[in-house]
Image (tube, helix red, strand yellow):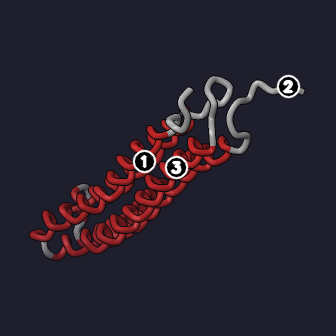
Amino acid sequence: MASAFSGDETAPFFGFLGAAAALVFSCMGAAYGTAKSGVGVASMGVMRPELVMKSIVPVVMAGVLGIYGLIIAVIISTGINPKAKSYYLFDGYAHLSSGLACGLAGLSAGMAIGIVGDAGVRANAQQPKLFVGMILILIFAEALALYGLIVGIILSSRAGQSRAE
């Protein structure tokens, strides 16, 4: 039986694994950050309900992490088409590393955002001067996921450069 497949037979497995890892780990970080920050917002809302909308910032920032994983997953999955172009193990590994870089950075950023968001909104309810400091810490935590997104884009762009065709 002749096959029109060119490249390594197992390479797409690693590419699709990278796409899944990007989305799953980023969404795990987003979910943890949202849940942990949300608990802090709910707890703080009992004492100071007028600050609830101002304290939603960590929840929104955590939600963005899932979008980073979605972007990388789409970039990776559109780059996997072994029928149109040869797809080698190098390409699969490039996509796997891209997905892991973005996904694990999103997971760690989500954990940081959740912990800082929870403690930050509770502290902000007691001392409003802490709001700017909390936002700065959250921005630096979000930047960690952004670094993973950038590295993921760079790594996924390396796929297809394994052999001159």
Dot 2 surroundings within 10 Å: few (below 14), some, or many (20 or more)? few
Dot 3 surroundings within 10 Å: few (below 14), some, or many (20 or more)? many
- Which amino acid, mark 1? Gly
Q: Give the label, 1 or 2, closer to the camera.
A: 2
User: Where is residue 74 drawn, in percent x and y?
Assistant: 51, 37
Vertical placement of 19 versus 53: above or below?
above
- Nearest the eye: 31 or 50: 31
Q: Which mark is residue 2?
A: 2
Res 2 quadrant in image: top right
Sequence-wise, the earlier of marks 1 and 2 is: 2
| Local SS, label 3 | helix
**Mark 3 lies on residue:** 23
Q: Is residue 74 visible?
A: no
Residue furthest toward the left?
A: 129
Q: Quadrant of the N terminus?
A: top right
Asked if residue 62 lies left or right of residue 140, the reply is right
**Mark 1 lies on residue:** 152
- Nearest the eye: 80 or 137: 80
User: Where is residue 84 drawn, in percent x and y?
Assistant: 63, 23
Sequence-wise, the earlier of marks 3 and 1 is: 3
